[in-house]
Amino acid sequence: MAIMIAIRGQDAEPWVKCFTERLPNHSIVLEGSHTQPELVRFGVSWQHEPGSLARYKNLAAIFSLGAGVDHILADPKLPSVPIVRSTNPDLSNRMSEWVLLHVLAHLRQYRKYDRQQSQKVWKDDRSQPSAEEIHVGVMGLGMLGLNAANKLKMVGFDVAGWSRTPKNIPGIECFSGSTDLEHFLARTDILVCLLPLTPETKGILNKRLFLQLRQGGPLSGPILLNAGRGELQSEDDIITSLDEGILRATTLDVFEIEPLSTDSPLWLHPAVTITPHNAAMSDPSAIVAEIAKQIEAYERGEPLQNVVKHTIGY
Ligand SMILES: NC(=O)c1ccc[n+]([C@@H]2O[C@H](COP(=O)([O-])OP(=O)(O)OC[C@H]3O[C@@H](n4cnc5c(N)ncnc54)[C@H](OP(=O)(O)O)[C@@H]3O)[C@@H](O)[C@H]2O)c1
């Protein structure tokens, strides 16, 4: 029984090594290299070539190497088998590190003091607000958003969250659905987007939405963080909103087209912080351990966990 790895945009070798060590009784093959595709039972994908999985007629399931599955569902010739996503706690913890780092960097004006240090300027800011005064709004209260929201709460921020379906989370004001969105935005000083990319969420981070964020809060304007997916945002709208004072600053980990073009005005904009889509990197050993457990359980006749609902896209 073979496991086929279909990866683009990153080195497949660490994944092959981890799968070989963890599942020594399975043959591990790279997509395109197997002479008998009918022997492949499980597919493992990160941005696989669209259409390339169609020749594996005996696939039982496709596993995503990350939390997101938009890269799999975008394949118009996707075999009709369960798609399983990763829910490894390692991913949530890494994402929360990124969220805390950048929310706190905006609160404590890290970029300003960094610039001052490079100019040997000693100038403190007596009007530093505290975390309690800042309303953080987390878009997406799933595996990543919930972990980040709880940790932001622990630091002292006034945290709310927005999800598709209603939630009741102690200490976090919960909003859901399109009817609640304006109320959620109206109380938000720092917006943290951890939504999946679906037909409903594509392009949601646009000027119309930014205009609904709380103006005149203690940070002198709303701040956007996005580590969900680049296609959630309009980069033209982000630049315009920064230049028109609708947004005060932004930290982006994801971009409409990656890698971000050297021509993009985002790179040198003084109110933009960029990280190269590494807010929560998938650690091969942690993710492979999770997938291997699922494969072993499936082979014992147990049902797969964390199967994606195709109809809602995540
Ligand atoms: N930058 C990185 O390094 C990195 C790493 C990993 C993942 N990611 C991204 O993070 C995304 C989220 O991951 P996750 O594991 O937290 O996903 P998840 O567990 O599936 O949670 C998704 C959340 O978004 C909400 N949601 C979905 N569609 C919505 C809509 N139309 N309106 C309002 N809320 C909506 C869901 O609401 P319900 O709770 O009501 O279902 C849920 O709370 C991934 O899809 C991926 O794109 C990025």
Image (tube, helix red, strand yellow):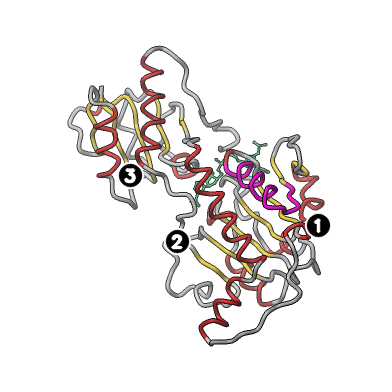
Badge 1: residue crowd in 10 Å (few <14, some 14–19, many ≥20):
some
Q: What residue is disc 3 on?
A: 7
Q: Amino acid at mark 1?
A: Ala
Magenta stretch: includes residue 307: no
Q: Amino acid at mark 2?
A: Pro
Which SS does the magenta portion mostly show? helix
Residue 103 in percent (x, y) is at 63, 60
Q: Residue at the location (57% across, 66% down)? A: 235
Dot 1: what SS?
A: helix
Image quarter hosting the C terminus: top right
Residue 166 visible in the displayed image: no
Please state which of residues 201 and 95 is positioned toward the viewer in this rendering: 95
Please state which of residues 165 and 272 is positioned toward the viewer in this rendering: 272
Q: What residue is disc 2 on?
A: 276
Which mark is nearer the camera, 1 or 3? 1
What is the span of residues highlighted in magenta in the rendered image? 144-160
Residue 159 in percent (x, y) is at 73, 50
The first of marks 1 and 2 along the sequence is: 1
User: Seen from this angle, which residue lies furthest left?
Assistant: 35
Measure the C-alpha gap from mark 1 to mark 2.
Answer: 30 Å
Residue 69 in percent (x, y) is at 48, 40
Residue 99 figure quarter: bottom right
